[in-house]
Amino acid sequence: MRFAQHIRDSKPNVYVTFNGDMFDWPFLERRFKENGMNMYDEIAVKLDGSKELYTSRFAPHIDAHKWVDRDSYLPHGSRNLKAVTKAKLGYNPIEIDPEEMVKFAAQRPQEMANYSVSDAVATYYLYMQYVHPFIFSLCNIISMHPEDVSRKGTGTLCESLLMVSH
C-alpha cells in the first residue's frame, strides 16, 4: 500500500526499467495480487492487449533493455544490466551471485539493499545518458509515442522517419 501511495504522490512522468516487461512489472503485479490489490486500480499500470508489454495510463514505460537490444551495438552476451553498465557507463556495479540472493536477503539484508540500489542507479544513468535522449529525440521527429519508439524495430522506425521526410 505504501508503494502504491508513493507512486500516486510522486506522479512519475516516465517509468524506466531494465527488462521491466519481463521481470519488474510481473513481480509487482504478483505482489499486488498477493496483497488483495489490483495494480491497475492502484497505479494505472497493466499488461497490454498483446500480453507482452506493460503500459500506464499516465506515463510511458520505457524498458531500457529494449534500447540495449536494438541500439547499443553490444554483442548478444553483453546485454544484461551489469555488462551494459561496464561497457556504456564505465563502472562496475555491485554483483551478487543469484544463488546467494535468498540467503543474503535473510542474513545480510543491507548488502541486498545496496545491490538493489546499485541496479537502480545503473538503470537511471543508462537511461539518462543514452535512452532518454535517443527515444525522445526520435519522438520529436516522428509522430510516435515514446513506448512505441522504444519498442519498435529498426525497420519500422526507419520507415516512419522516411515518411516524415516526404
Image: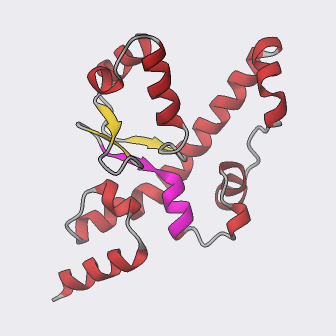
x and y percentages locating residue 47 in the rendered image? 36, 40
Give the extent of the magenta segment. 60-70
**66 in the magenta segment:** yes
Image quadrant assignment for residue 89: bottom right
Colouring rule applied to residues: secondary structure
Which quadrant holds the C terminus? Answer: bottom left
x and y percentages locating residue 36 in the rendered image? 40, 11
Q: Is residue 110 left or right of residue 158?
A: right
Which quadrant holds the N terminus? Answer: top left
| Residue placed most toward the observer, 9 or 89 | 9
State whether residue 96 appears in this view: no
| Residue placed most toward the observer, 68 or 140 | 68
Residue at 23% across, 36% down = 58
Image quadrant assignment for residue 11: top left
Image quadrant assignment for residue 35: top left
| Residue placed most toward the observer, 43 or 11 | 43
